[in-house]
Image (cartoon, rainbow, N blue to C red):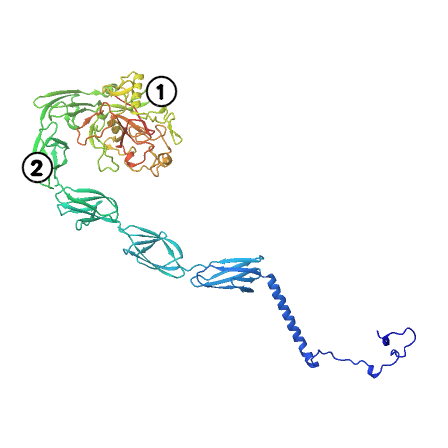
Amino acid sequence: MTEREQPSLGGKNPNSTADRPPRESERLIPQTFQPLGQNTDESRRGLPLRTIGLALAGLLALSALAFLFAARSLEVVIHTENEATLEITGVTISLGDRYLILSGTHDVHVTAEGYEPYHGTIAVTDEQTQRVDIFPAILPGWVSIDTQPTGAQVWLDDTLLGAAPIARVSMTAGSHSLRISAPRYQALERDLQVTGRGVAQQIALALEPDWALVHFQTDPTAVTISVDGNPEVYDNGAVEVLSGKHLIDIAAPGYQAHQVQVTIEAGVDQDLGIITLRPADGLLELDSEPSMANVSVDGRFQGRTPLTLSLTPGLTHRIQISKAGYQRRTERVSLERGTQDSRTISLQPDLGAIRFVLSPADAELLIDGQSVGQGSQTLSLPAHEHRVEVRKAGYASQREKVTPRPGLEQQLAISLLSEAEARKAAMKPEVISSLGQTLRLIDPLGEPRNAFSMGTSRREPGRRSNEVLHPVTLERAFYLATHETTNAQFRQFLASHDSGQIEGKSLNREHQPVVRVSWQQAASFCNWLSAREGLPPFYRESQGIITGYNTSSTGYRLPTEAEWAFAARIQGDNTLRFAWGDAWPPTTPVTNVADNSSAYVTGRILNGYEDGYIVSAPVGSFPANPRGLFDIGGNVAEWVHDVYQIPSPNSDVEVDPLGAQNGDNYTVRGGSWSLSRLSELRLTYRDYGQSGRDDLGFRIARYAQ
């Protein structure tokens, strides 16, 4: 503060202006403010625009700062082979593959050549750094396929495309399974990589031949060739044969067909050398009047008429035809190679006189089943055995056998019994063993027929080679058990016996059929039962071993194979194929075999069949056959009496056959709970063995007289 400016401490300051009016020079005059460097008019116009600009710039800067503060870093990875175009809705800042973008949901659109347009949304979270992978769908490609040979069948992913060539098939990109096959060529399988993206691909594939050439020369040269029964072209001494095992048949007129089995490897040729065919036999169709005459050629038995004989060409053969009661005929025959002839030989009977004396006087007389009148009479009959029957209403028929002798008259007197007398003398229709087993009488002579053929024709479906047709006649009446022997019954003979179990299923219950017994044990059981009832033993036994049998014994035994076959198959004039009839397969539960429930035990089943039992059933669980016999074709297979053998197709008629006295193996008949095939369930099915099995038992029999 200057001295001039110091306030006065007292009194008035002569220089003070407080009490005086201001001078002109001291008056305050109002002035308008204007910025430096501008005049008054410019200031009035520019101030608002600049202010607004600065305000907007400030706002933009603040917004940018706010966006940068709130934005998140997003990496977008587009998986395409070709360059892609990406569009994202909303405010973004692109930094190469990264974008600054606010949190939230944004629409995305991607386009790329060879790909489907992609439309989708992405969700941006609050994380600072994020990544999104986009996989646009690849467009299909175009694939064309050529094969050698043409016309091969083409499968893609197990779908048939058709026959090659295949032109421009649209296929999705990626790996596919391609399979090509053609007759007589090896199938080809491979993976096919389809590029897609509209790219065209051309595939050419060649198949390898699936055959080889088999070379051979023949004598004679003019032959026809077939492979597995199908005709083939024989060209330049060779034939094309597919890979694998095959049978080549070579045939020529007048020669025996020749067969060669070959195993072919594709592309590896074989040479069989020279094959010489043998001249074909001549064929003679021979019949006789009457038929069923025995025929031998050059001293060797060939069978019974009618039959066809194969005769070596160029030789004279001596053919003899004979039949009991008829004169023997001899013929000499010569045939050329491959020729055929037919002849019918008439046999002259050897006659013998029989005087039949009948009582009552008007009884009817039948010879070999044919009525020859009533009352006593004398007949001239061929000199062979005849079946004689005399019958009359109210009387029991009587049957006899007679063999006439030429030049010697014989007499046969037959007196019929009344029905009451016959019933008294007749055998019991049933007997019951001391173990409670019911045995039913079977009298072959009292049935419509007692002669039949065991085995079956070669044309029978399922036939096995041991089922040879051969004639059998049963004359001796016998009893046969209606049920298979049970565990309870067998354990009275052998208390320690255990039939066991299989896969947890018992075979050892009281009323199940006994199994796991050998033939020797079954025969010994029969002798034990005979001794128990005071009957003569049927089997000869030494130190516990069966060594033979006694044909005159009426003790218990196993049924003969012929008896079993007769009881199971012969029903009047009909011959059954299966235990339930002739239909295959059975549609209702008729016997116990390997049904659907047995699969895990047997490993094989009769598909669609249900019998209610996995293993053996209690005996008698299924309907009996017309003779009242239960389980004759199922439940368990059964030991029979006979030593096992394969019969001769040309054997003589066997009457009440029993077979050999002893042997190593014995015959088994009938189906079982573990069998299911047509072949095994036929009543002609035969098996053999000596030891026990879990599906093999037996039933007992005995002669009636």
Query: What's under tag 2, amino acid-wise?
Result: Leu
Give the class, few, some or many, for how many residues have Cα within 10 Å of label 1's Cα (few <14, many ≥20): few
Q: Residue furthest top?
A: 534
**Looking at the image, can residue 43 be seen?**
yes
User: Residue 640's image quarter?
Assistant: top left
Q: Which residue is mark 2?
A: 315
Q: Say if residue 293 shows up in the picture.
A: no
On the rendered structure, is 42 left or right of 446? right
| Of callouts 1 and 2, the N-terminal one | 2
Disc 1: which residue? 492
- Circles 1, 2 touching at the beta carbon (< 8 Å): no
User: What is the C-alpha distance between the residues marked 1 and 2?
Assistant: 67 Å
Q: Is residue 200 above or below residue 554?
A: below
Q: Quadrant of the C terminus?
A: top left
Of helix, strand and loop, which one carries label 2? loop
- Expressed as whole percent of the image width and height from the top left, the position of residue 162 reads 32, 55
In this rendering, the label closer to the viewer, 1 or 2 = 2
Q: Amino acid at mark 1?
A: Gln
Q: Which mark is residue 348?
A: none
Residue sticking out furthest to the bottom:
24
Q: Nearer the viewer, residue 599 or 438?
A: 599
Q: Is residue 55 above or below residue 159?
A: below
Q: Is residue 78 left or right of residue 630?
A: right
- Single out the residue that lies furthest toward the right: 11
Where's the N terminus, which quadrant?
bottom right
